[in-house]
């Protein structure tokens, strides 16, 4: 079951400057930065709040690390701005994707891929979702001390 908005993905050309803008302007301080080679991005997850299902809501800033990455192509075509919306699930992201596919929505990957902070993800085709690239996210379960 989809339980929350997991994050809003925003494409940017300069990750460090974007992180600083969101820290200075909105006071977001809980930041996780990593490189996702498979997706071709350097990204920052800025935590907005905790969610009732053990997950959280984030703002995801995405800077391309390769010219052939989807984010680089998005920036070249559209400039900086909102790239996608992601919904979190409290279940298995593969099952969520299959259930949505059964309703006629195209799923972009045959199997989930690795997302931010070890999550499992898949995407839904924007042409089937009102022009919005939509991501499904299964967060890594929280462990003691996390």
Image (cartoon, rainbow, N blue to C red):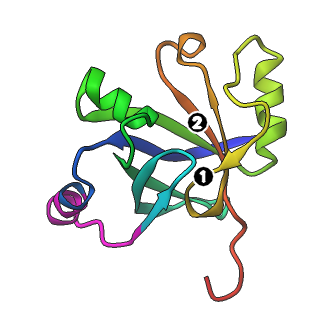
**Which numbered tag is attached to residue 20?**
none
Helix, strand, or loop for circle 2?
Answer: strand
Question: Magenta segment: does it hold 21?
Answer: yes
Residue 55 position (above or below residue 71): below
Mark with earlier residue (2, 1): 1
**Which numbered tag is attached to residue 135?**
2
User: Is there a contact, CB below 8 Å, between mark 2 and mark 1?
Assistant: yes
* Residue 101 placement (x, y as % from top left): 78, 20
Residue 31 position (above or below residue 17): below
Helix, strand, or loop for circle 1?
Answer: loop
Residue 38 position (above or below residue 71): below
Highlighted magenta segment, given as a residue range: 19-32
* Residue 28 placement (x, y as % from top left): 29, 66
**Picture quadrant of residue 107:** top right
* Residue 77 placement (x, y as % from top left): 29, 21
Between the C-alphas of marks 2 and 1, the distance is 10 Å
Question: Magenta segment: does it hold 63?
Answer: no
**Picture quadrant of residue 21:** bottom left
Quadrant into which the C terminus falls: bottom right
The label nearer to you, 2 versus 1, is: 1
Nearest the camera: 140 or 91?
140
Residue sitting farthest toward the front: 67
Residue shown at the point (44%, 37%) measured from the top left: 69
Crowding near the residue tagged with mark 1, few <14, some 14–19, many ≥20 C-alpha atoms within 10 Å: some
Residue receiving disc 1 = 115
* Residue 105 placement (x, y as % from top left): 70, 15
Residue 115 position (above or below residue 47): above
Residue shown at the point (27%, 44%) measured from the top left: 12
Crowding near the residue tagged with mark 2, few <14, some 14–19, many ≥20 C-alpha atoms within 10 Å: many
Quadrant into which the N terminus falls: top right
Q: Is residue 3 left or right of residue 67?
A: right
């Amino acid at each position: 079951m989809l339980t929350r908005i997991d994050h809003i993905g925003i494409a940017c050309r300069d990750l460090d400057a974007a992180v600083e803008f969101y820290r200075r302007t909105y006071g977001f301080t809980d930041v996780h930065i990593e490189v996702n080679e498979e997706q071709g991005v350097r990204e920052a997850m800025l935590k907005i709040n905790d969610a009732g299902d053990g997950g959280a809501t984030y703002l995801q800033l995405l800077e391309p690390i390769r010219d052939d990455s989807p984010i680089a192509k998005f920036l070249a075509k559209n400039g900086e701005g909102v790239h996608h919306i992601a919904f979190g699930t409290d279940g298995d992201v593969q099952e969520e994707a299959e259930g949505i596919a059964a309703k006629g929505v195209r799923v972009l990957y045959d199997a989930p891929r690795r997302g931010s902070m070890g999550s499992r993800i898949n995407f839904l085709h924007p042409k089937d979702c009102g022009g919005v690239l939509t991501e499904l996210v299964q967060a890594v379960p929280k462990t003691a001390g996390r």
